[in-house]
Image (cartoon, coloured by chain):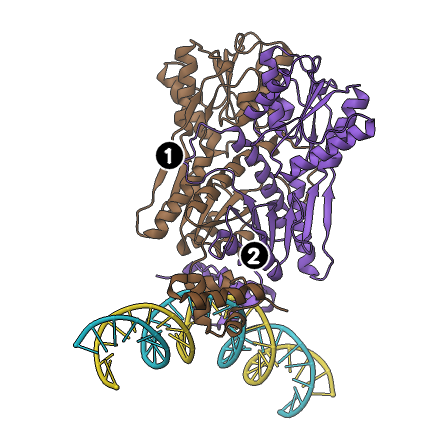
Chain colours: A brown, B purple, C yellow, D cyan
Amino acid sequence: MSAPTVYDVAERSGVSIATVSRVYRNPASVRDRTRERVLEAARELGYVPSGNARGLASRTTGVLGLCFPDYADPDAEADAEADSDADDAAMLYSDQIIRGMERAARRHGYALLIAASLEGGPESLVAKVAGRVDGFAVLAQTVPTRDLEVISRRLPVVMLAGPREIDHLDHVVVANAAGERELARHLIEDHGLRDLAFVGGDPESPDAEARFRGFRQACQDAGLPVPDAPDLRTAMMTQAEGARAAETLLDRGPERPAAMLFANDQMAVGALRALERRGVRVPEDVAVTGFDGIPLSRIVRPSLTTVRQPIRHLGEQAVELLVQRLADGNRPPVSLELPVSLARRASCGCG
Amino acid sequence: MSAPTVYDVAERSGVSIATVSRVYRNPASVRDRTRERVLEAARELGYVPSGNARGLASRTTGVLGLCFPDYADPDAEADAEADSDADDAAMLYSDQIIRGMERAARRHGYALLIAASLEGGPESLVAKVAGRVDGFAVLAQTVPTRDLEVISRRLPVVMLAGPREIDHLDHVVVANAAGERELARHLIEDHGLRDLAFVGGDPESPDAEARFRGFRQACQDAGLPVPDAPDLRTAMMTQAEGARAAETLLDRGPERPAAMLFANDQMAVGALRALERRGVRVPEDVAVTGFDGIPLSRIVRPSLTTVRQPIRHLGEQAVELLVQRLADGNRPPVSLELPVSLARRASCGCG
DNA sequence: ACCTGTTCTGAAAGCGCATTCACCCTAGAG
DNA sequence: CTCTAGGGTGAATGCGCTTTCAGAACAGGT
């Protein structure tokens, strides 16, 4: 009762396996009558061509891969209720990339194979995915560089967000620094704010660091003191931690900042809530900004001024680069920086 | 410069291909020294085992598949700004399923292959996916029944949401009817509302219809008049259409309903906004409810009373069923109904 | 009827790996 | 020192399909 193969279909329809194959690969090359017979037999048998065999023979899979980080413990039973902050944020990000890649992939006739991953090695899901795709997109810091070295020798790999770990890879990032710089410039020049506080994240987060660099540049541009490090850092960059950060900044006393710039929207939203609880008005008493442009940022009150990240576009670009490289393996490696856009909303006083 | 194979690795490390294979499949069966030599050679060569060849030889792929509907036109350039209602809603739903499946799949050592689809046939992505996976989950109404018939003869298929189109398939749904029934009961009994209006969707939407059935049951339970059809239907079930529906209901004059029950959250949120514009207070003048429990429902003001759907859980259950069936192909087909839970919030007066 | 030019179809050779079977080597027992 | 057990390894086969390369079938033109 194993699955029917070309041989079964061939026998049943009285042709050779070559013809059966042609019916699927190049229907026009088979006479109508013959094709009908074959398809009929296939239907009766419940024949579905084996992707493995096809891939082996044609050396191509028609599948692109994506590896993204796994923020949540897969073994912890996901309690239906508790969709925590971190979870929401992570979901938004990787989900949008998935969506973007899926769309673009489909446009090019590819399916998308995805796997979250923490660890590498020959046993890992990463290796499995890598062996089954024509091209591979990797979110920064999800696959050990060591593994990437090996994989990228076998098939096109594009690196998403974060630093380009290996220079012969294609690479797509968003303009983190430029975005934050523009945002800070807006606060300084357009709103006349001078005392800005930046709340960053883990120093290991390339995005958060790049945003801080943009902040510094803006300070420098404006002739303000240039900080060496963020005024505050949080580990997970969640709403809860954003709230705590806001309170910490408030408690610093009289030199309370005129604006709080958070390295992402989640923290900023948490801060908005904390400030409301404390009776601090936004933007009258203090301006608040985020980064990412998550849906929530538009909904929350006051609506959050932020930098919109074209995350979905990131995924789409990844696919485009992969497709291009599959067409021309010799194209020199590309490094794209996708533009971001400032969303001026209520929380900075633009309401 | 084609990709290195077992043969290359074997030659370079001075062993046979069988040994190379063993190093990857069953490392313990190879002497330490030998294994090291092989891995070393593999690293130098940039060897990644071909999933196709492996799959062909072992008749298993280690991949599960998901097919979901494609709401947006993939050819329409996704304008970064315009994340329309429909788009958002769709994204939430399929994304959550993807996320759920991905997690569960990973727990079982599987990767996930996804593809949106409109059409079937031997050329389609569906066929491609089906040929490359060990098991297959399908969102209702995304794959022609005709194709499913064929595919399900070759590998386990589980149907998600919607009616079970083929009875020998496993099947998972959420308790749409029971949820809406409970919701309506709550409005009637706990809030003493009697004049309820139900806004449905396309009659082709099994979910919307099931919810309406639940509504009818609640009416019957309470001895209220039982409507034959929803008071109103919208085509796309978007915020915009929800807003319009709310206005239509208002314009009906004096017999304005005491509660508006929408078949999903999107419409309900749109309605809230329309009602606010019209100066109608919620819940004082009219109660509003949704269905789904999307994140937005919790954020909007007043917060929306709704029925939480365990969408992610749906994906996880799909994987569990597939895994079970892969272990025991003879298990009789299962039909699961996942419980939903009422989220009593401000928009019905529970604030 | 004969030959030429097209279609259409079949035979056969892999694609890269897993796996069985037989063999060899080493270690320990006799 | 010989014999036996096993662990370790290699040769060979097949997984189901694609893809030449030829040959068969058929159309058209003389």
Q: Which callout, 1 or 2, points to the residue nearer the camera? A: 2
Residue A270 falls in image quadrant: top right
Q: For the image shown, how many numbered marks are present on the structure?
A: 2
Q: Residue at x 35, y 47 (%)?
A: A324
The image shows residue B40 at horizontal and vertical percentages of 47, 61
Q: Is the same chain shared between marks 1 and 2?
A: no
Crowdedness near tag 1: few (<14), some (14–19) or many (≥20) residues, C-alpha within 10 Å: some
> Could you say which is closer to the camera, residue B63 or residue A146?
B63
Amino acid on which disc 1 is placed? Glu
The image shows residue B343 at horizontal and vertical percentages of 72, 27
Quadrant of the frame with the N terminus of chain A: bottom right
Q: Chain of mark 1?
A: A
Q: CA distance from mark 1 to mark 2?
A: 35 Å
**From what the image shows, is residue B347 above or below residue B153?**
above
> Could you say which is closer to the camera, residue D7 or residue B19?
B19
Where residue B133 is drawn, which disc sits there? 2
Can residue B59 be seen in this snapshot?
no
Can residue B243 be seen in this snapshot?
yes
The image shows residue B80 at horizontal and vertical percentages of 43, 30
Q: Residue at x 47, y 41 (%)?
A: A140
**From what the image shows, is residue B194 above or below residue A22?**
above
Q: Chain of mark 2?
A: B
Q: Which residue is mark 1?
A: A337
Q: Secondary structure at mark 2?
A: loop
